[in-house]
Structure formats: structure tokens, C-alpha cells
Amino acid sequence: MTTDLLSLLPGSALTADTLPDIPAGRLVPAALLGIAVLVLLIVRFKLHPFLSLTLGSLTVGAVAGVPMADVLDSFTKGFGSTAAGVGILIALGAMFGKLLADSGGADEIVDTIIGRSGPRTLPWAMAGVGAIIGLPMFFEIGLVLLMPVIFLVARRSGLSLVRVGIPALAGLSAMHGLVPPHPGPLVAIDALKADLGVTLGLGIIVAIPTIAVAGPWFARLAARWVDVPAPELFEARESETGPRPSFAVTMLTVLTPVVLMMGKALADILADKGTPARTVLDFLGTPLIALLIAVILAMFTLGRGAGMGIKEVGSSLEASLGPIAGIILIVAAGGGFKQTLVDTGIGQLVADWIAGSGLSVLLLAWLVAVLIRLATGSATVATVTASGILAPLAAGMPTTQVSLMVLAIGAGSVFFSHVNDAGFWLVKEYFGLKVGQTIKSWSVMETILSVTGLVLVLLLDIVV
């Protein structure tokens, strides 16, 4: 069942016919050595992450005994699928973010947030913004939309980038793992036949305190460990005296892709396949189309609304792509590294090891997701695989416990993001961090979020 589910993932080469029959004695050292080589090349020899990820992938395949031709096929497949998916979204998000900054729209949001929030409440406001933006969309999309706001809020408020950014990231990540209609939880709900309404309600109950602990509260400690200035990736426009779009217009533009994706998620739940409404909303809510519409809309509401000419709008869009070229290559190489780990059968091995244990069902669900997440670097792979393994156990269980199992899997799927996760490299590059700093801030935050979510799920299991 695990293999069949994994074969449905975009870019995955795992099928019953192609999964390599490699003994565990080679798979585990291959994964550990590949990750060790990757970290050593980046930290010790200062090699660019793109090259390091490529060499790490080759190391995994060589130690596992997979033919190099197959290793290259897995790496290029993962690289290509990630670049085609996440890469395009990063580019569109960068265009949107540059228009948001150059038009003064980001300034308007920042001024409004800072004007209504003091230094003590600002991280909480950022956590709320991250949660709202992250509800219907994947983490990477929400991150690129929030970047200009995070940077400008950090610069204008005088607070540490980590102090402001970690709460927003916690809001994004919690939605990614815990709350439908985000695609991750919806996959688990479908696989386990959980009740959507019950899962949504319990997910919100778990998500709110989880975001508080992993976001604003942890950010106070993380800011002491990692103190970096906001990178100059998104600059405010030079003229502070010209017109700029209003807060209402700016928020309407920013939330356009959110609303479109939310509409798609609700249509997938409520509307029958093939109906005109479902077809239209599915198309408009596709991340690429939603962001493309947002960019085109921003050209008018933000660019033209701020008095920018056609040439100025074009120059802003063009200038947005240069700074993120390296980020796209790194993230795509991270997808190649992840695909190499998946195609060697490491995720399958982890699932087989844990599935026969006698642990609590909810703890087992969390552990399965955690181990597959650590092995493959993908929250989606962890969610799909864990849901497939545990689906037979969900049959006959009470409705609330099935929903809690969905949340346990979701919490486990975001555990300790590290070097084989595309999100790790996105955060590192956008925030201008070193690998060690990224681990001490982002990776620890993800771990706190995961463990806090599990604790709350276990407590709810006692109460309900």
C-alpha cells in the first residue's frame, strides 16, 4: 500500500516493479553518508549548496549500490519536477513581491501592522498573518508571498529578522501540517476516511497553541541564538513621498491567490467532479494560475495604482528574477536529492520497520510520519505514506480518534526539516543564514511545532 501511494506523487519513480531490492545494511549507511557528505561540503569546504546536493545524491546512490544511470535519472527527475513546480511558483512569487515592495504596498502593510502593534505584540501579528496566508497553500508559496513583509517589518520595527520571521513561518508550517483545507491534511483525511468537519475543528484547536509555542514564544529564544539583519532582497521604493496603494487594495491583491486556492479546496470538497463550477474553480485555484492572476492584478492595483508607468512595472518584474535564480537552483537540487532517497527505497524501509510495532496508534502515526520525513525530506511523502500504512488501523475507530490520527500524522510530517528538504534551503537562502543558523532557528522551530502538536493530540485523545 505504501508503494502504491508513493507512486502517485509527482516525480516519484516508486512502483512495485521499480522499487530497488537493496538490503537495509546498505540503505541506512547510504542515507547517513549522503547527508554527512552534503553537510561537510557546505559547512567545512564552503561549496555551493547546488553542487553539494548534487554530489550528496551521487554518494547515496553509489553507497546503496544503485547503477549510476538510475541515480542520475532519479536526481534529474526530482530536480526537474521541483523546478517545474516550486521553481515557477518562486519566480511568480518574486515578481509579485517586487511589485509589492516597489509600489509601496509592502510599506503600507508594514506601516499598518507596526502602527497597530507594539514590539511585544508584533510577533503575534506576524504569526496570525502567516497562518492566514498559509491556510490554503503550500509552504513555499506562502513564504515567497510573505518575504517582502517579513523583511520590511524587521527593518522598520528594529526587531531581529528571526524574531519577526519565525512566528510567520510557524503559522505557515502549522497550516501545512494540521488544518484542512490544506492539501496535506486533506490527503490524510481521504486515506483514513476521517470526518472533515471534526478534523477541521480539532485541527484549529491544536494549531493555535502550537503556533504560539513554536512561533512567538520560541522566537524570543531563537533571536538570541541567531542574530542576522534583514537581507536586501526586497527593497522599498526610493520615493517615500509618491502615491502608494491603500491598505485595503494591497490586502485585496495579496489575498487574491489565497482566495482562489481556498475556492479550489472548497470546490474539491463540496462540488461534484465535472460540474462547471468545480472545473472553473479547479483551474483558477491551481497555484500557478492563482499566482499568475495575482501578478497580473498587481501590475494594475499596485503598479499602476502607485503611479508607476508601464516601463517601470516591466523593469520591476525583470529585476525580481536575478536575486532568486540561485534559490531556484538550490531548491531544485534539494528536490533531486530527496528523489534519490525516495527511489532507493529508504522511505519504504523506514515504514516497514515501524509498522509492526506495538505502540499507541496516535504515537505510531506520528513516528511513521517523522521517520519518513527525516528519510525523504518531504512532508507530503510522509503524510501520504503514513496515511497508507495506518489506513487499516483506522477502520472501526471512533470518529474523533481517526481525526486525531490525521493530526498526529500531520504533526509528524513537519518534524526537523534538514538538508534534504526544499523548505530548509528556501528559508536559509531567503533569510541569508548559514546552515548551522538555519538548524538552530528553522529546524528547531519545526521540531517544537511537531512535538507540541503531538502532545496536544494526545491530550485531546484523553479529553474527547
Image: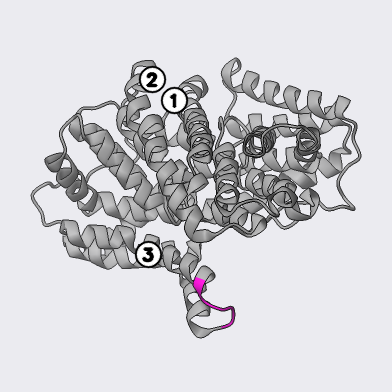
Q: Is residue 373 above or below residue 84?
A: above
| Residue 227 point in image, percent of width and height | 34, 20
Q: Alpha-carbon neighbours of circle 2 within 10 Å: few (<14), some, or many (≥20)?
A: many
- Residue 259 got which mark? 3
Asked if the residue under mark 1 is in contact with the one under mark 2, i.e. CB atoms within 8 Å, the reply is: yes
Front residue of 444/390: it is 390
Identify which amino acid the numbered label 3 is placed on: Val
Do tag 2 and tag 3 residues touch (Cβ < 8 Å)?
Answer: no
Q: Nearer the viewer, mark 2 or mark 3?
A: 3
The residue tagged with tag 2: helix, strand or loop?
Answer: loop
Residue 120: horizontal and vertical position, in percent?
20, 29
- Count residues near mark 1 (Cα–Cα under 10 Å), then give few for <14, some for 14-19, many for 20+: many
Q: Residue at left 77%, top 49%?
A: 2
- Point out the tag, 2 or 1, that comes first from the N-terminus: 2
Q: Closer to the camera, 64 or 92?
A: 64
The residue lying at 65 percent from left, 32 percent from top is: 374
Q: Earlier in the sequence, mark 2 or mark 3?
A: 2
Q: What stretch of residues is rendered in magenta? A: 270-274
Main secondary structure of the magenta stretch: loop
